[in-house]
Image (cartoon, rainbow, N blue to C red):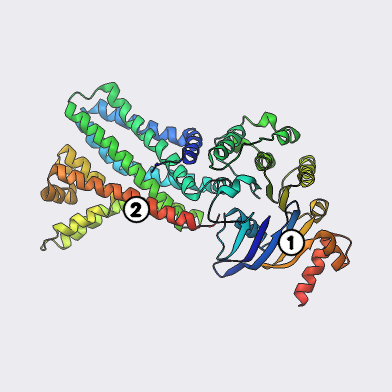
């Protein structure tokens, strides 16, 4: 089976042209360019990578959700026109999804990678870490644009859509880890490692964090869930499991969003 | 050309269509009229598969709507509001629609008809980003897109709303030309005089039910009114009294 039908490819091509001209997309790439450049100027490549990880885990989900929600709002009436063509809903959905996600992911990769290319990384081991960081950022983009599609499918009011998107980001990027920590402290006397593993699988940002910190091998920064992951699975297996879980975080929301998209009225 | 059978659609508690059954003749210009909220747009969108009805069936040339999307290759649609991707130009939009139709399976050779571009004096607007165009100009782009592929069936939702009188006249002439060429047109409008000029058939919707479906002449004869506007208000008064 072909992943993308010729029609989907056409839609993606034109969406790329549209999104690719957005000033926000350039601002997003420029942001990572400036941050990575500054980090590299003020510290070594290893420290810069770690700091850039935190920025990535924080900013990529936010931009994917907010940009995605605005994009889908703008696309709504245009969606109507496209669905009046001989195009199936599945084809259009795939076209919109990739048309949104690919330029966002590309902006992140270009913005974050160029400073490293200019300044040089040195240690080839750090080059692998940089590659993992870029891959994790791309995965997070795929996850959170998919979640933006889910929000768009289930929340009808425009303002509440944006509110829901931002709330989702707050939970995933900020609150979740804190809540897990509170839970861990409350239940400190019990064997809760398995529960902690389960909780990590429940948040894509945590999964990305675990992958990156296992890769960098800095347990001090791993947080509770990361430490449990390493203890349980060790580096390589832990990364593989977390990556699989992260891939599920792409496919499940995409499938959920598609189901709703097929049923909905335009 | 189109057979609609027992169409029902609810939005929450609101019953927008309550068992609509209509036939649209090939080669007719069918005006769908009724007060605001009568279900005109919902009916039109159901034919396009944009709205999924709760029950009932629509067949366009024997093809059941909802199963296959190929039938839409022969439809030109002009929605009520024209909003497009912000950063694309009108030329890119038209190229995109052409590309999509060319890539769709089962589409025969396409004849692109661009005469409306010049008739609506749109040629020098084509290179500008769509977001910079005025509402009326976007509506013209909308019209060009609907007529571009010489479709057998045109579905026009308030086509002249927002257009200046000249553009409006151009569009009406075009609809008449399509009628004379034997194509089928479904049109809604709030301007009854306009519909009277264009329509051969009329479907009157009131609160989601069909009050009248048939030829324009028959409607005028039956209500013994001189024009469509008065005939419609006669029907509405009758409905209110019943």
Front one among A21 and B27: B27
- The image quadrant of residue A219 is top left
Q: Residue A25 shows which numbered tag? A: none
Which residue ends up furthest to the bottom in the rendered image?
A: B242
Viewed as shown, does residue A125 lie left or right of A157? left
Q: Within 10 Å of the Cα at label 1, are there few (<14), some (14-19), or many (20+) other Cα atoms? A: many
Image mark 2: chain: A
C-alpha distance separating marks 2 and 1? 45 Å
Q: Residue at x 22, y 25 (%)?
A: A121
Front one among A185 and B102: B102
Front one among B8 and A71: B8
Provide residue A179's location: percent of width, then percent of height. 25, 57
Q: In this view, does A241 lie above or below A35?
A: below
Q: Check the picture and name the quadrant holding the C terminus of chain B.
A: bottom right
Provide residue A181's location: percent of width, then percent of height. 20, 55
Q: Check the picture and name the quadrant holding the N terminus of chain B.
A: bottom right
Q: Residue at x 49, y 54 (%)?
A: A159
Front: mark 2 or 1: 1
Image mark 1: chain: B
Residue ID for mark 2: A252
Q: In this view, does A23 lie above or below A154?
A: above
Viewed as shown, does residue A149 lie left or right of B125? left
Q: In this view, does B154 lie above or below A35?
A: below
Residue ID for mark 1: B203
Provide residue A116's location: percent of width, then percent of height. 27, 26
Which secondary structure lies at badge 1?
A: strand
Whether residue A70 is visible here, answered yes or no, is no
Which secondary structure lies at badge 2?
A: helix
């Amino acid at each position: 089976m072909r992943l993308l039908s010729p029609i989907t490819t056409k839609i993606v091509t034109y969406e790329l042209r549209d999104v690719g001209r957005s000033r926000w997309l350039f601002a997003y790439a420029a942001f990572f360019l400036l941050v990575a450049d500054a980090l590299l100027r003020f510290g070594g490549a290893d420290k810069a990578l770690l700091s850039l990880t935190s920025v990535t885990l924080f900013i990529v989900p936010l931009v994917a959700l907010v940009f995605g929600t605005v994009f889908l709002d703008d696309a709504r009436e245009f969606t109507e026109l496209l669905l009046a063509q001989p195009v199936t809903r599945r084809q259009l959905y795939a076209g919109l999804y990739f048309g949104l996600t690919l330029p966002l992911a590309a902006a992140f990769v270009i913005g974050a990678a160029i400073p490293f290319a200019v300044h040089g990384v040195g240690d080839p081991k750090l080059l692998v870490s940089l590659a993992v960081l870029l891959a994790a950022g791309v995965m997070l983009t795929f996850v959170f644009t998919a979640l933006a599609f889910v929000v768009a499918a289930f929340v009808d009011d425009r303002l509440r859509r944006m509110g829901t998107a931002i709330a989702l980001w707050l939970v995933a990027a900020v609150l979740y880890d804190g809540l897990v920590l509170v839970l861990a402290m409350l239940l400190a006397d019990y064997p809760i490692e398995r529960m902690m593993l389960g909780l990590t699988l429940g948040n894509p940002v945590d999964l990305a964090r675990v992958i990156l910190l296992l890769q960098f091998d800095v347990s001090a920064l791993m947080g509770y869930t990361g430490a449990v992951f390493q203890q349980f699975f060790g580096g390589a297996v832990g990364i593989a499991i977390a990556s699989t879980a992260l891939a599920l975080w792409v496919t499940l929301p995409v499938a959920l969003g598609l189901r709703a998209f097929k049923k909905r009225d335009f | 050309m189109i057979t609609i059978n027992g169409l029902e659609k609810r939005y929450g508690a609101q019953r927008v269509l309550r068992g609509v059954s209509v036939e649209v003749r090939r080669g007719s210009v069918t005006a769908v009229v009724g007060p605001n909220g009568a279900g005109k747009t919902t009916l039109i969108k159901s034919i396009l598969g944009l709205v999924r009805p709760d029950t009932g069936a629509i067949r366009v040339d024997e093809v059941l709507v909802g199963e296959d999307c190929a039938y839409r290759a022969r439809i030109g649609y002009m929605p009520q509001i024209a909003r497009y991707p912000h950063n694309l130009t009108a030329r890119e939009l038209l190229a995109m629609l052409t590309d999509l139709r060319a890539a769709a399976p089962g589409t025969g050779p396409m004849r692109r008809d661009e005469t409306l571009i010049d008739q609506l004096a749109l040629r020098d607007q084509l290179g500008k980003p769509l977001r910079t165009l005025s509402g009326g100009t976007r509506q013209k782009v909308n019209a060009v897109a609907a007529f571009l592929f010489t479709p057998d069936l045109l579905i026009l939702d308030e086509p002249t709303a927002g257009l200046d009188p000249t553009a409006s006249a151009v569009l009406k002439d075009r609809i008449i030309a399509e009628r004379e060429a034997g194509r089928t047109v479904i049109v809604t409008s709030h301007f009854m005089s306009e519909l009277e000029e264009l329509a051969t058939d009329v479907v009157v919707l009131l609160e989601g039910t069909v009050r009248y479906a048939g030829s324009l002449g028959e409607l005028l004869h039956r209500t013994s009114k001189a024009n469509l506007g008065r005939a419609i208000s006669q029907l509405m008064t009758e409905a209110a009294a019943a």
